[in-house]
Image (tube, rainbow, N blue to C red):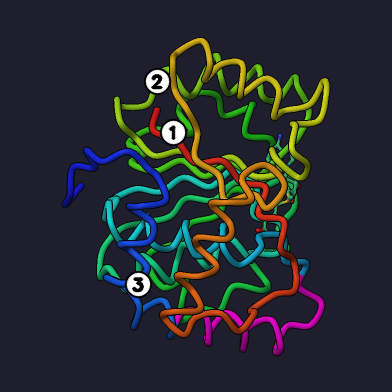
Amino acid sequence: MGTTMIEPIDTELVARLYAAHRGGLDEARRAQRALLTRNSSMRAQLDDVEAEITYLLLRHVRPEVVVELGALDGWSTSWILRALQDNGSGKLRSYDLVDGALRQVPDELAGERWSFTRGDVRDIGPDVIAGADYLFIDADHGARFARWYTAQLLPALRSGTPVSVHDVFHQRWARPFGEGRVVLRWLVGRGIEPFTASRARAPRVYAQLSAVKSHTGLDDPVRSGRRNPMIFFRS
Ligand SMILES: C[S@@+](CC[C@H](N)C(=O)[O-])C[C@H]1O[C@@H](n2cnc3c(N)ncnc32)[C@H](O)[C@@H]1O
């Protein structure tokens, strides 16, 4: 990695990154909006703030290898690829049971920087994260899947590797018996406090970042969703 990320992932860091990468993010937002307009069948899952935090962290840590579990139609994939494109370095490996992303991610964005593997990531096993400098998880939201990756993948990451997990805080509390509960328990056991901009879980963070977006002129929506249920942490 070009930058060793020693700072905690928190509101202060994210606010700083909104300012530092304002131009690139503005372009990325325009391109993502255009992609969604052009590919109207695309099922896009990430909300704006969590997608932007993903973009900004990737710009900041400049990973060589990003691994994405769960691409669906390539919405998160294309956000990640834009950050790597803007960095001028880094590769993305995406995994999914379905290959909609192959049809939706623009060729010029994918370039040489993207590879996609269709199948159940559990069949690949821990090799799936070989060399990963950033792990993005938005796949199966059941507890069993989370037990698999908290046991097999997270402990195998290099210390300090950024990880994000989607669909944890749709509400103030993670859904009982789901992925979120398992990963949050794993984090508590290691004394790791995840960062989230979830409107339900962390309304003050959401309000602070909304103010930053407004201040930097990045507040016109790309998508309408405002829940931002993703958590971010360093392994
Ligand atoms: C919520 S969607 C991903 C949305 C995408 N990240 C986005 O931003 O639009 C979850 C995806 O995970 C995939 N998935 C679920 N279980 C999986 C598994 N065991 N291995 C690989 N992919 C899986 C599903 O096929 C689905 O496309």
Relative depth, front residue between 177 and 226: 226
Whether the residues at callouts 1 and 2 have beta carbons within 8 Å, the answer is yes
Residue 209 covered by magenta stretch: no
Counting from the top left corner in percent of width and height, residue 64 is at 28, 51
x%, y% of residue 22?
A: 35, 78
Q: Which mark is residue 156?
A: 2
Q: Amino acid at mark 3?
A: Gln
Secondary structure at numbered mark 3: helix
Q: How many numbered markers are drawn?
A: 3
Is residue 88 shown left or right of residue 126? left
Q: Which residue is mark 3?
A: 85
Disc 3 from disc 1: Cα separation: 21 Å
The one nearer the camera, 111 or 232, is: 232
**Up/down of 105 relative to 115, above or below:** below
Q: Is mark 3 within 8 Å of ligand 1?
A: no
Question: Which residue was labeled with disc 1?
Answer: 129
The residue carrying pointer 2 sits among few (fewer than 14), some (14 to 19) or many (20 or more) residues within 10 Å by Cα, namely some
Seen at 50% across and 33% down, the residue is 194
> Is 183 situated left or right of 127 in this image?
right
Which element is circle 1 on? Answer: helix
Q: Secondary structure at mark 2?
A: helix
Per the picture, the main secondary structure of the magenta-coloured stretch is helix
